[in-house]
Image (cartoon, rainbow, N blue to C red):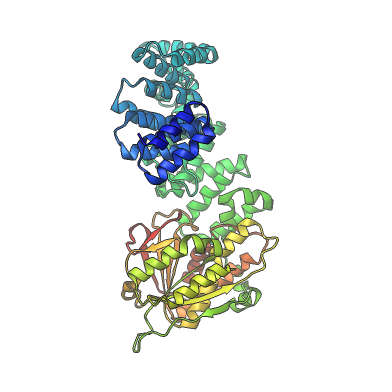
Amino acid sequence: MEPALDDAIRLHKSGNHAGAEPLYRAVLDRDPANRGALQMLAMLLVQTGRPAEAVGHFQTILRLEPGGVAGYSNLAAALRLAGQGAEAIACLHRALALDPAHAASWFNLGNGLKQLEKAAGAARSYQRTLAVEPGHAGAAGNRKTLRDQWGPRLDEAERQAAAARHPLADADARAVAAEALEAVGDAAAAETMARAALDRDDRNHRANRLLGRLLLERSGAMDVRSGKPFAVDRSLVEEAIGALRRAVAVRPDDDEADWLHVAAVATLVQVGMASDAVLRDGARAAWVRLRRHPKDTVAASVIGFHVYRRDRLVLASWLNRRFRRRFTAAEVAREHELGLWTMLRADDAFFRALPPVDAVLESMAPLEWRIEPAPGPAGEPATEPAVFFCCDDVYFRRFAPALLESLAERMPGATVAVHVVAPSPETEQAMAHWRTDGRLRVGFSLDRPEMSGWADVKRVTYYASARFIRALQWLRRLDRPLMVIDTDARVAQDLRALSVEMAGHDVGFLVDGRRRGPSREITVCFNVYNNTPGGDRFLSLLGAYIGHFLAGAEVYWMLDQMAHYAVLDWLNRHEPIRVRRFDFLNFPYCHFVGAK
């Protein structure tokens, strides 16, 4: 053992955590794969109340020893203490699959299930711990504590389940048993019992409601959060919706089943899994729900999604303006989906009242041209596209270096225009460096808008949306096709190859064909605007639309995506332009970091 590690362990065991920690870290600086130092530092972090930091070290140990049962068990303990109970349970199941007789994993599983109030599973886990290791004091003590807290409910669930298993038990008895099993956290047994109740009577209200709720929990639909990874089982959600609809058919006043049904439909739309039939039926239920709950934003969204799917954007816009009047600005700001719909306008009166984009430009902070792209080689066609990206200073420092490197590697000699809002001196120096780097022909512009008093959501939305107004200025200045790309993207292939596919078109959009809503269909992480009258007309109207909302009191995230869809819809009805659609789910030219 390395002497420094030996010293660290000695200090650690004596209780001198402050002395041991820097020694462990010093060992890992020299040898990042030192398993002993990783293990001991992770344990120290748990002991000193930093389990979230310990998680990373336990994960490193598992990468070094993928089959380590103790590694999964230790990681699970840290995850549980860090508040990630579901992830901890998954780790422990992997550990027990490797070694079903691992007492520590059974014990940790009991603790994790107890924390999640799954008392039945916790009791079984403590029992398995004691079966493997009869003298395990922790399991015996925790089982006693669990019985003190949950004993009557566990006994009642067992009694009800035994009665429900009788061959003559009716649907109501089985539904009651299913509810008792769910109350002690035994979801699998509760689901089985609810199905048994429905075998007796498929219209049993309580069994249908419980089955619907349990299936939604198992499907992953309840865990979907904007910007977070998720996995949703569509078949389970659709089965849950069927059960919930049956529950509401029997008891129209069942508010829980009604809400779960509508919310499940909304989730399926947002993750791109809702069929037209499921959405149609969900919209009917949403109309009924709105009569009882006039401010239910989820129900209103489902109706909006249904009308959008029918390509009636003017009606969707009108309905949501009418619905919006029921809320204060503060309430809208708290409801993400409501904010999205607030930015949808599709009516002729709105578009015809928009000021010209030049008026929007005059109201904005002046654009400062700092670096002109170097001229291209003699004879370069005017159809050679330029790449454009725009961001604030923080985003530039975080993402732009990698994007620029990928452009230089995949598209040497390309023209790249960069616009930064309120750049720091360091960012201006970085752009000066790229000017002389020689691998790209770089242009650079900036603006410094006065943002004092702006809410965070307006400031962030400005960065995301005003870039398309700046893109119009660069399109006119360069007089060549402009490819607008997200700053957090990476280029995987030469984008100039798309010029052939853009021939004869005015604009090109990366489209999510799953029909997830008007603010999610045109992803705007990669767009092409040709230097044609149609391309200029689209960007000009887009700039006027965005400028209208940026000038108002209410502006919300994803304005840029909503604006693209609304403007394209209006132009298609009045002044059609030529659109090339690229498949967002199968676009090999770029890799994107952020959620779209």
Q: Residue at x 34, y 77 (%)?
A: 503
Q: Residue at x 45, y 10 (%)?
A: 159
Q: Residue at x 63, y 54 (%)?
A: 322
- Measured along the vertical axis of the image, is residue 242 above or below residue 32? above
Front residue of 525 and 198: 525
Displayed quadrant of residue 237: top left
Q: Position of residue 314 (x, y in %)?
A: 54, 62
Displayed quadrant of residue 425: bottom right
Count all numbered tags in the image, as a single digit.
0
Displayed quadrant of residue 350: bottom right
Q: Is residue 130 left or right of residue 81?
A: left
Front residue of 342 and 375: 375
User: Which quarter of the rendered picture does the N terminus lie within?
Assistant: top left
Q: Position of residue 494 (x, y in %)?
A: 33, 70
Front residue of 50 and 458: 50
Residue 249 visible? The answer is no
Q: Residue at x 34, y 61 (%)?
A: 587
User: Which quarter of the rendered picture does the C terminus lie within?
Assistant: bottom left
Front residue of 279 and 555: 555
- Measured along the vertical axis of the image, is residue 340 above or below residue 188? below
Q: Position of residue 379 (x, y in %)?
A: 34, 89
Residue 122 visible? The answer is yes
Q: Farthest front residue?
A: 3
Q: Position of residue 100 (x, y in %)?
A: 30, 22
